[in-house]
Amino acid sequence: MSGSSSDQEVCARVAQILQRERIAQNLTITRLAEGAALSRQGVSYVERGLRIPTLDTLLRISRVLGLDLAEVIKEASRKK
């Protein structure tokens, strides 16, 4: 089952928001990955939109960043 282009755009914006926040917090991909118990490569793939992350992965990343995942998704959905 493939998502609509709108769904794909929201997914891409979620990844951009998470990356933007990581950079704003001066956090390396390595530190984020360690804190989220994920691989560095996995986090990199998510940020670059090369992989569609599971809900668990998004929750882990957002938790390390101190973000409410629901708010991140709302923000990503609002942008046009």
Image (spheres, rainbow, N blue to C red):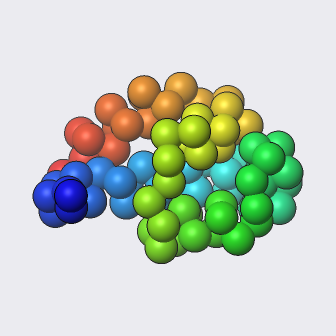
Q: Nearer the viewer, residue 55 or 33?
A: 55
Q: Position of residue 29 (x, y in %)?
A: 75, 62
Question: Which residue occupies 76% across, 44% down?
Answer: 36
Question: Which residue occupies 55% across, 49% down?
Answer: 18
Q: Position of residue 60 (x, y in %)?
A: 66, 38
Q: Residue furthest front?
A: 1
For residue 24, say whether it is visible. no
In the image, 52: left or right of 66?
left
**Quarter of image, res 59:** top right
Q: Position of residue 53 (x, y in %)?
A: 50, 54
> Looking at the image, is 53 positioned above or below residue 57?
below
> Looking at the image, is 52 positioned above or below residue 69?
below
**Quarter of image, res 64:** top right
Question: Which residue occupies 65% across, 43% down?
Answer: 61
Question: Which residue occupies 67% across, 32% down?
Answer: 63
**In which quadrant is the N terminus drawn?**
bottom left
